[in-house]
Amino acid sequence: MTEKLFSVAEAAEYLGISEKTLRGHIMDGNITYILIGRGTVKKRRMFATEDLERFKESRRRREIPFTVVRRNCRRGTSSESEELIGFSARMAQLRAEKEHRRAEAEARRSTSKAKPSRVR
């Protein structure tokens, strides 16, 4: 006894998706099909019921609720001797370093721009 094969339109209706979506799954290799005929340009794809059911099972998902798992959290003290710097202090330090570099660059520029005096 031969089983019924579904065309692209019938398979899409069976799965409850559009033909375009079904063709996308075909191109991605998510669903298997049977080639009918000898065409190489316009392939005639048919789908067996078991292939459609296998595809439906492969797409079955269950949402897992998001939970926060706290493992190995630090409790306020560090095992290493690290220096903690507050955000504002760090930003002030960076600004001071930047200003220092700018002043050094300006000093280098002003000494290199000094014109030698001409003797007449």
Image: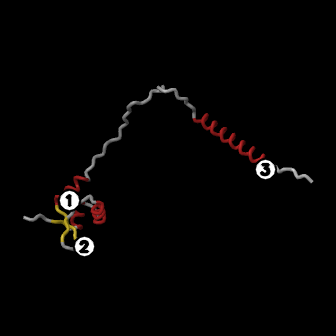
| Residue found farthest to the right | 120
Q: Say whether disc 3 or disc 2 marks the residue closer to the N-terminus.
A: 2
Asked if the residue under mark 2 is in contact with the one under mark 3, i.e. CB atoms within 8 Å, the reply is no
SS at badge 3? helix
| Residue bearing mark 1 | 52
Q: Position of residue 89 (x, y in %)?
A: 61, 34
Label 1 – label 2 distance at C-alpha? 23 Å
Pick the quarter of the image with the C terminus: bottom right
Q: Residue furthest left?
A: 1
Q: Label 2 belongs to which residue?
A: 40
Q: Which of 105 and 38 is in front in this view?
A: 105
- Of 32 and 102, which appears nearest the observer? 102
The residue to which callout 3 is attached is 113
Residue placed at 52% from the left, 29% from the top?
A: 82
- Return the x and y of residue 11 as percentages of the image width and height: 22, 64
Find numbered disc 1 in the image and state the secondary structure of the residue it sits on. helix
Mark 1 is on which residue type?
Leu
Mark 1 surroundings within 10 Å by alpha-carbon count, few (fewer than 14), some (14 through 19), many (20 or more): some
Q: Which three-letter amino acid code belongs to the residue tagged 3?
A: Lys
Q: Which residue is drawn at 60% across and 36% down?
A: 90
Q: Distance between the residues labelled 3 and 2?
A: 77 Å
Nearest the camera: 45 or 119? 119
Q: In this view, does 48 lie to the left or right of 96?
A: left
